Image (cartoon, rainbow, N blue to C red):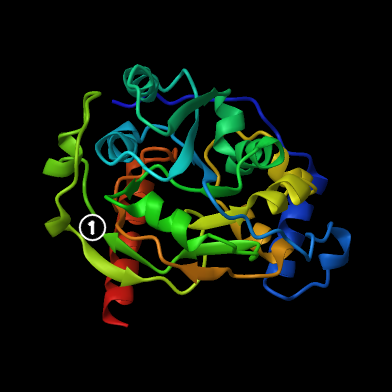
Amino acid sequence: MTEKLVYDVKMPWYQGIQEFALRLAVSKLLPMRFLYEKPPEKLAGKTGRLKIEIVSHCWRYSHLHAYQLSSLVNHPPKNVDIVMTVFHAKEDEATTQLLNFFGEKKVENVTWNWQPVTPPELFRRAIGRNRRAQNTDADWVWFADCDLVFGEGCLDGLAESLQGKKDPLVFPAQERITPLLTNDSPMLKAAKEPKVVSVDQGDFTIRVLERAVGAYQIVHGDICRSVGYCKDVSAYQRETDRWKKTFEDRAFRWILGTHGVPVEAPSVYRIRHIEKGRYHGSKAASDMRKRIRKAQDASRNNS
């Protein structure tokens, strides 16, 4: 049985109003853009050998994250330098063990960057993303989820696509996805203990992406250092007592004023899962979320 952790973190009433108002603004129902710093309009097009920082958060998804870290071991980049940053909490023992395991592995052109934080900091993903955005020295920052897998040639191909790019935000033109998996699926059971694992390409189907979303936001480094990640939205920089829905991702793109530009990044895989171990709630609520996810998935596949 999963231990339920409780944290005494309360959001002031005015920050709750700020978050609600910002969600209305993002939906074009309130004029609020003037309140936030505009990103720089002119960006340098970086060429040559690039440095890309990948930023992930992991809370109780070590069996998914194992595939992401393994993909860097199995397919080390050749023509680009990668910083793999992972925000995690020591209370998540499985993830801590996983990071300790991979931290011992030397991978050419890859630097491991583990960022331990408290659970209330981890649960608000914008906090970690903002810290890395403002402090990165990378040419580009890929704000990812821990269920992404970088297949053969993915990061080298991405680096080639980014040569001379001056766009503030780009995203992969397509992804390869699994069906919705349960925790007892062979793929996820294979990664229950820390080890190097690999995916079977036959388990994935191709999906075209039309815009950047939370896991597929690859941001110009100068943009990151200038505007951070919702750094001026205090509601999104405040700790919380449980994992929050990531409304800040839409707010970030709204602040940038773009849904992003597609680029070629071959062999991007995403492991889709129906179990939401990071969210608290009753079994009934969990079952309801599963049914909703199944219905949403069926609707997308039939559209």
Instruction: Identify whether 120 is placed above or below 234.
Output: above
**Residue denoted by label 1:** 178
- Residue 101 in view (yes/no): yes
The residue drawn where x is 29% and y is 33% is 73
Outermost residue toward the bottom in this view: 303
The kind of residue tagged 1 is: Thr
Q: Residues within 10 Å of mark 1 (few under 14, many from 20)?
A: some
Q: Which is nearer the eye, 12 or 272?
A: 272
The residue under the point 66% across, 42% down is 133
Relative vertical location of residue 239 with respect to residue 178 in this rendering, above or below? above
63 or 71, nearer to the observer: 71
Q: Position of residue 227 (x, y in %)?
A: 76, 50
Question: 45 or 58, which lies in front?
Answer: 45
Q: Is residue 259 left or right of residue 216?
A: right
- Measured as percent of width and height from the top left, residue 7 is found at 59, 25
Q: From the top left corner, tell me how far across and down residue 36 is, in percent.
A: 83, 58
